Amino acid sequence: MIDSVFHAGRSRTIAGLALAICFTFLPATSQTAFDTQTAAKSDTELSTQEKKVIEYLQSVWGKDNSVTSVDQAMTILGLRPSDETRLRIGQYIKQHPELHVVIRRWGWETLVLTPDEKLIARAIINAAREQQPAPTLKAIAKAVGISRNDAERGLAMLERYQILKRDDAAGALGYAVAAPRYLNWHPRLDFVFHRITVSSGRNTSVN
């Protein structure tokens, strides 16, 4: 079953009709309301380069139905791949849903997580929904098509975003779902992503 879940998630292109269906249906299932208190709690300080990523995302979100993610923007702008940089930018987006309607419509998770992180989260959350043991690290790495080290990095990032939490009772993996709301997302439409190249040549994501 885990293989079928990941196979669906790794699709990189979709037909126009499927895109229209997803774009119509998903906002109702994963919309994030704007909470001014959450936005004001704590603010992540960004460097000049990191601010450029935010500015770029604001300029492209919504164009061609774009939900371009942080890692895609960093690549486009020529920033060196860095989990720490991506985390700071992601935390800023999480803290500031007022930046763009795309954040409030699709949820910050859609924009700040990499495809591999989404697939890891989906596997653990789906198992929890179905009251099944969490998949092992080996099973996750094999299903996502990454190394065990990369799977561990993904788990660590999901913990830092408070999507997962350390839990000794969660079996060998040692992680459990941190927020009950993730268990209530639609089981086949959460953490979705479709990476495409639009006619202009720009790489983006759509949901």
Image: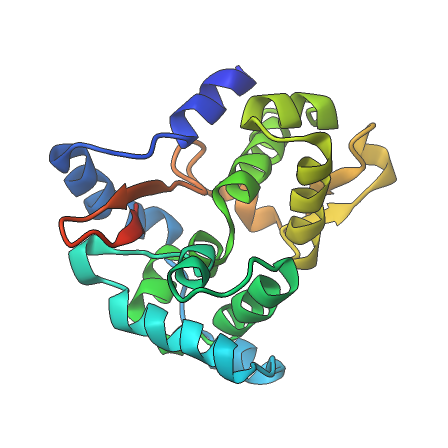
Q: Nearer the viewer, residue 12 or 159?
A: 12
Q: Is residue 133 visible?
A: no
Q: Is residue 43 above or below residue 59?
A: below
Whether 205 is drawn above or below 140: the answer is below
- Taking the image as shown, residue 186 lies to the left or right of residue 180, namely left
Q: Is residue 43 above or below residue 164?
A: below
Residue 175 spot, x, y in % from top left: 75, 40
Image side of residue 167 versus residue 91, left or right: right
Q: Looking at this view, is 12 or 2 the one in front?
A: 12
The mark total stands at 0
Question: Is residue 9 visible to the viewer in this orientation of the structure?
Answer: yes
Identify the residue at image location x=35%, y=30%: 11
Q: Quadrant of residue 134?
A: top right
Looking at the picture, the colour scheme in use is: rainbow
For image coordinates 82% across by 42% down, the residue present is 167
> Which quadrant is the C terminus positioned in?
top left
In the figure, 57 relative to 196: above or below? below
- Residue 70, position as x, y percentages in the image: 45, 60
Q: Residue 160 location in percent, x, y?
A: 69, 58
* Residue for point 49% across, 58% down: 112
Q: Quadrant of residue 125 in the image?
A: top right
- Give the left or right position of residue 28, taking residue 180 as reference: left
Residue at 37% over, 61% down: 76
- The residue lying toward the viewer, choosing from 67 and 98, is 67
Percent x, y of residue 153: 70, 45
